[in-house]
Image (spheres, rainbow, N blue to C red):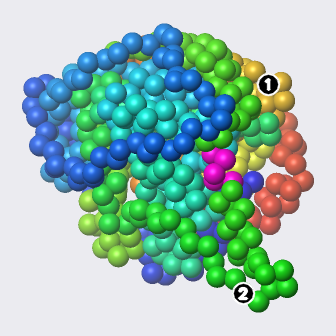
Amino acid sequence: MRRLLLLVTVTIAQSVMAQEVLPPETQTTPAPTARPATPGSSTPTTTPATTPATTPATASALRGERQPLRMLPGRYGHASQNLPVTSPTQGDEPPYRVSSRNPHQMRVLNSGMGSLYARIDMIRRARRSIDMEYYIFDPDVSGRLILQELREAARRGVKVRIMVDKFPGEFALNEHYAQELRAAGIEIRYYNPQPLYRLNDSQYRNHRKLMVMDGEEALTGGRNIADEYFDLHRQYNYLDRDVTVRGDVVRHMQQTFDNYWASPIVETPRPPERPVATNTENGESLEQFQFDQQREQARRVFAPDPEVDRVRRVVEVDGLRSFNDRPERTCPEVSFASDREGATSREARNSEDYQRRYRLLRQEIARWMEDKIRDEVTIESPYFLRSKITDRLFELIQQRNARVRLFTNSLVSSDAVPISTAFTTTVRQFTPLENFRAYVYRGRYSGEGHVADERIRNGTWGIHSKSIVFNNDSFMIGSYNIDNRSSFYNTELAVFCSGSPELARDVRDNIQIRMNNSYRLNAEGNAEDCEDIQADAGLYKQIMYQLLRIPAHLMEHLL
């Protein structure tokens, strides 16, 4: 619900700023140049900014603290690989766009519980460093579990860094938590700490999701750090997708993290100061009361918690089972692409230069569509709005007579009513096409993975995966939504794989499971079985849907 309210707020704010920054649909984007991967060539890389190593703090141990963590079963250590990566083309700047035809090891993580297991496993295997970068990092049960694991890693000498986007309304790991993390040997920084009243600059968010271990292994995809991303929330959970990567592109993923960490619009949090008391009857102001509450809440982040311990035990059993549902496989051709950090409204005023220098992932997606689409493409995105990417996609579909399957949220499963409202109009532009099929999720548990709690299983589920499957042997997994915020404002990243029918099947088969629990739309954009798609959405969502029909349509280019 907080994401729904936040999106409404942002939409209103953007309507004010629209006169100063051209919306995405009015931008002119240079066509990306195809760059086939060439084995054996090398990519020059910029030297990442360095930060001093942090010595783990020796804070006093809490009573009842657990013993040092054991290694999770079923995994093994990996030797570092330092292999050449193909050279970029003109307009590309490493490490933001790189490709390789050296074999990479990849594992598709469809289950939330299995993906939480993978993160804990990587933390426990780390020897030198753990870097984590997320749009959302909540100190709820899963967030505290991960932070406790990170503290254990820091105690054994692993350098731990966390970067979180500081967007009001989503930001939760505040300066009080930062103080506790620093005491535990964990470095933390905030991306773009602009208040909402600075309407222009506050829109340029870091939406990337990335975890890198020892500079050798990475995990990326659509999941943030919060209970609803790991099948743990009792009201609403996301169906999402991550992928682990081992191979030479990981060092470039690591370097983009280093570049973001050193960005001039990144803030190192300062210790919070208690407000000065104002005239009150009891001697304490509301601001002081709130400060003390936040401080006390943050101090409990590492305290023993039966619920955190219970979830840890569940993850070590059910998470391992879900993790092993799909094996690690070899991908012969891999690309990594990320948008550049540090953009503000000043850079965006020069549209052509901004698109060329900062919006690099969109260029890579366009290249893969151009090179890979032959027979069929399957798109899974929580949000789907018309943009330059969709226009180019459907040009290619019509030129090549390729089939497209779109899978996204219905009003029932969506966390963003304005986008669902605009989608109703957008999708009807494409449903009459003979080769186009659209599916919207019913909002029920899909039956995939291992969910231990019956109440979680019976809650509402929504799509949050950001994946594209090209033909039967290529795919993309990342943080990029098919909407204009991902195309123009947010920094995003993705990993691409080609030449592995097995890995592509791991993605496509899971999308099919979810499609089996969806409405298929007819040419008019309604359910083929004549069911009312909005019937189970709830009164609040239905009212908001009606109220936002005109505003959402008018501001679709800003969503």
Q: Nearer the viewer, residue 298 or 455?
A: 298
- Horizontal side of 182 relative to 12 (left or right) equals left
Quadrant in the picture for the N terminus = bottom right
The residue shown at (59%, 65%) is 168
Q: Tag on residue 227? A: none
Please tell me whether residue 426 is drawn above or below residue 445 in the rendered image: below
Residue type marked 2: Thr
The residue shown at (72%, 87%) is 278
Quadrant in the picture for the C terminus = bottom right
**How many numbered circles does the render carry?**
2
Residue type marked 1: Asp
The residue shown at (36%, 34%) is 157
Percent coordinates x, y for residue 114 in the rendering: 58, 23
- Under circle 2, the secondary element is loop
Percent coordinates x, y for residue 121 in the rendering: 49, 23
The magenta-colored residue range is 297-301
Please tell me whether residue 467 is drawn above or below residue 197 in the rendered image: above
Tell me whether the residue at label 2 lies in contact with that at label 1, contact meaning CB atoms closer than 8 angstroms: no
Please tell me whether residue 292 is drawn above or below residue 119 in the rendered image: below
The residue shown at (30%, 28%) is 216
Q: Nearer the viewer, residue 151 or 553?
A: 151
Q: Tag on residue 453? A: 1
Q: Which residue is mark 2?
A: 278
Percent coordinates x, y for residue 136 in the rendering: 56, 50
Which circle's residue, 2 or 1, is located before the other in the chain? 2
Q: Quadrant of residue 130?
A: top left
Q: Quadrant of residue 303?
A: top right
How busy is the neighbourhood of tag 2: few (under 14 within 10 Å), some, or many (20 plus)?
A: few
